Amino acid sequence: MTLDEERDAIRSELESLRATGAHRRELSLHACKRLFFDLGIRPSAAAVRELTQTGSASDIPKDIDHFWERIRDASRVRIGGGAIPPALEEKAGELLGTLFEHAMAQAKQTLEGERAQAFGALDEATSALREAQIRREAAHDAWQRSEARAEAALARVRELEAQISASAAIRASGDEVLQATVARLEAEKTRLEQRLESEQVTNAALRERIDGLHQELRQSTEHYATQIKDAIAEAERRVKPMLVELDSLRSMASTYQSGIRDASRKEFDFIQQLSAAKGRGDRLEAQVREQSDEIDALTRELADVKSRGALSPELSALVRSWAESGRFADSDFIALGNTLDSHLDLPGHCPKCTDGEPELSRADDGYELSCPECDHSSGVKRSRLEAIARFLNSARSDSNGISA
């Protein structure tokens, strides 16, 4: 059997003895006997304690001493009780003395080994104790730091609670101010809505008034335009035949000397007719002046209406046609100013060369409309209306002068 198997068998025997009610000393004596006689191992406190699993550090050495005492007693009894010769008895005593000395030396050696083991275990325990003290001090320091952090955290919690209380008070006051502001804004909103409704009613009335004025202005303009057109047509119808006949008579007078007297008489008659036509023209001119005054009044009313609302396209086209036909004087352009500038479009072609596209430029004192092809220009005028009218009228005047 191996040593481990022998030890397991010894443990089984000890368990059997313990089951039968054996005491500690009996278990220790049995373990010492088995170790010494069967295994040849000197019994030690550690070996016996390992097998029996019982007994204290002071009891097991006593049990071992009792085992050796029983061995010595058994040896003395066996030696002294037999019929041994004296010489053999002396040799047996010497042998026993030698065995005892060897046993004592072996015991001392074993004691020294166990003592060294005990001192090693003591050193290890001292080192473990020192490490435990160091760990305890480190744990104590960590505990103190944890306590400090806990106190700081508690102070921070108190500070945050105070801040939360202050924030709650500020929020409550802010809510009160917000509610007051909302109430004030609601009242202001109601007041503005009422004012908006009244302004809308006023604007509707003004819009109706502007529409009525536009209608009146359109009717008056159409009426005056019809009268002016009829008067001009009548004057042209009466004057043109007289001028044609006068030209024919003058040409006949240069060719036929014999008809001078008759021609002079006819010329006198024609002059009288021209005088009558001139008188009618003067009357028409006076009527035109009156109508011009009415146009001035309409122009002022138009400016007033323009300041209050938009100008109708029909009226702007009519005023432009009058301006382009030369019916407006400088005072009319001054009265109109820049009122109709936003309602006017530039002519697409130059009336003088018919190839150029007029260009409108803004000068320091007004507007200038010119043709880049023939350098025909309106000159610097006060408004776009006057510039367009002068540009077209001057071209017509030049064409009439060339034809004459």
Image (cartoon, rainbow, N blue to C red):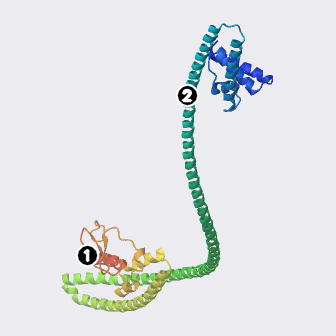
Where is 186 relative to 40, above or below?
Answer: below
Q: Quadrant of the C terminus?
A: bottom left
Q: Where is residue 354 in the image (x, y as percent from the top left)?
A: 29, 67
The image quadrant that residue 150 belongs to is bottom right
Where is 215 relative to 62, above or below?
Answer: below
The image quadrant that residue 275 belongs to is bottom left
**Element type at marker 1?**
helix
Q: Quadrant of the N terminus?
A: top right
The residue type indicated by label 1 comes to Ser
Where is 364 relative to 34, above or below?
Answer: below
Residue assigned mark 1: 403
Q: Position of residue 365 (x, y in %)?
A: 30, 81
Residue at image location 55% in from the left, 40% down from the top: 126
Given residues 297 and 6, the one toward you in this image is 6
Mark 1–mark 2 distance (CA, rounded to whole Å): 158 Å
Q: Residues within 10 Å of mark 2 (few under 14, many from 20)?
A: few
Given residues 335 and 266, the one toward you in this image is 335
**Of the image marks 1 and 2, the number of the one nearer the N terminus:** 2
The image quadrant that residue 159 belongs to is bottom right
Rendered image: mark on residue 88: none
Q: Position of residue 227 (x, y in %)?
A: 45, 84
Q: Is residue 99 left or right of residue 270?
A: right
- Residue lying furthest right in this view? 20
Given residues 368 and 46, the one toward you in this image is 46
Given residues 256 and 38, the one toward you in this image is 38
Total numbered badges shown on the rendered structure: 2
- Residue lying furthest front in this view? 86
**Element type at marker 2?**
helix
Residue assigned mark 2: 112
Of circles 1 and 2, which is in front? 2
The residue type indicated by label 2 comes to Glu
